[in-house]
Image (spheres, rainbow, N blue to C red):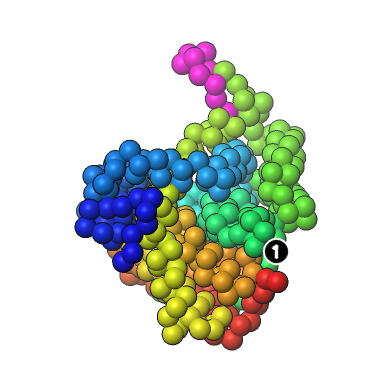
Amino acid sequence: MEENKNLTFRGGMAFSLVPVLIYVIFCIILFIGFKAFNMEALAVGGFLGLLIGGLFCKSYSAYWESAIKGISSITSVSVIVILLLVGMFSQLIKICGISSGFVWLANSIGLKNGLFVAFTFLAACIVSTATGSSIGTMFIAFPIFYPAGMILGAGPMWMAGCIVSGAIFGDNLAPVSDTTIASASSQLFKDGRTADIGGVVVSRLRYSLAAGIPTIIIFAIAGGIGGTYQGGAIEAASNPVTLFMLIPVALMLFVSTKTRNIFAGILAGLFVGTAVGLGTGLFTFADVFANDPANNVAVGFLIDGINGILPTVALVISVFGIMGVLTDAGMLDFVAESILHSNAAKTESGAELICMLGISATTILFGGVTSASILTFGPILNKIGSAKHIHPYRRANLLTGTANSLPAIVPFLSTFVFIGSALTGLSPMLVAGGSVYAFMLFFVFLFASITGWGRMMEE
């Protein structure tokens, strides 16, 4: 492998991958050994990888200059700023407990068995699209929907799988999702502009619906298998007033996609959402922003939103640091050129298929942490797709769609499956087996890559 003159490593360019290797080992220890998951720990793995990886570089100072250059890139700064603003809107939706409104609606119209599973999938899709957080959606939805599903005759495997599926749906589609932000920001037009999030979301809808519609049908038909209907009401987990929070969610989605400006969408959603929440009594002014004199700290969902997203921001910073090192070492260019000059990548379909393989491998290695895998493989896909004149929207969709499909639910290596298993007591195999949407999304992009369905080209 030819080494880049800007950054050279003892033993060759392959040793620039040491930070990635250390991060992967850290993920394995964290998920399999400790059976724990949190973004702070993942960020620690990223920064430890950077610290140790520099020992293999011939110039430790040049190594860190490359890392800082990656962290301070316009893409990195853009992702961090958007995530911080998104954190406030996500927290606004979370504190209102919107999922309890969906439980009330399902109980009111008498849904049970497989129909309740299909309904829960739809509800989880809406919650995850509103909050932009797949992990947050699971922690919100499982305590409310899963016990209700057991009462209403849903099969445990399907009930767990429909919540994971709904969380993945929003993680893939939501304009306020970290994976959507990362995938759009990593794909550039030929004039240097990053792919706008609004345009990416609009073009992504076809793939989400193509995977979502058969998923609903499967859950409706098979969702009652293994369950026993117990009857009875579930009023304790119901609150119809929270459904009013769909108004700011719809407005945020509309403004973001209409203006293709995520900042305008977040501003509209925050302003209207705060007004709706105060007007309906879901929270008070003290829940928005207030002082806690006992502890001399400011509190409220605005503060909690920033605090909640900081671990993700730390992970993003560490990954961009690693990307800076790999870029200056020439590793990213080497991988992209190797793919471009391979026989498999001679056509647009072949290039997309081999990129799907690369995205899948990266996501599996990163333990299903899709944001990290997208940031890692994104620059490679950008170079390959640009050389093949594939539109940045299509590339961003392929990147996030593949990462959020089968590679994200590999048992014992997936954060999604691990959390679903921990919250239900089911085996990882059952949770993964019931995550129908991940299967459907993978086959949709496999079909799209082979046939060219939905492919847009850039002039």
Q: Name which residue lies at 42% across and 55% down.
A: 327
Tell me, yes or no, if residue 70 can be seen here. Answer: yes
Q: Name which residue lies at 55% across and 36% down.
A: 305
Q: Quadrant of residue 55?
A: top left
Q: How many marks?
A: 1
Q: Name which residue lies at 62% across and 25% down.
A: 289
Q: Amino acid at mark 1?
A: Val
Residue bounds of the magenta highlight: 292-300
Relative to 64, say whether 13 is above or below: below
Decide whether residue 382 is among the magenta residues.
Answer: no
Q: Nearer the viewer, residue 210 or 386?
A: 386
Q: Position of residue 124 (x, y in %)?
A: 56, 59
Q: Quadrant of residue 270?
A: top right
Q: Name which residue lies at 42% across and 80% down.
A: 342
Q: Position of residue 80 (x, y in %)?
A: 54, 42
Q: Nearer the viewer, residue 427 or 82?
A: 82
Residue located beneath label 1 in the image:
202
Q: Which image quadrant: the C terminus?
A: bottom right
Relative to 52, say whether 306 is above or below: above
Q: Nearer the viewer, residue 153 or 120?
A: 120
Q: Position of residue 347 (x, y in %)?
A: 54, 84
Decide whether residue 294 is among the magenta residues.
Answer: yes
Q: Is 341 on the left-hand or right-hand side of 199? A: left
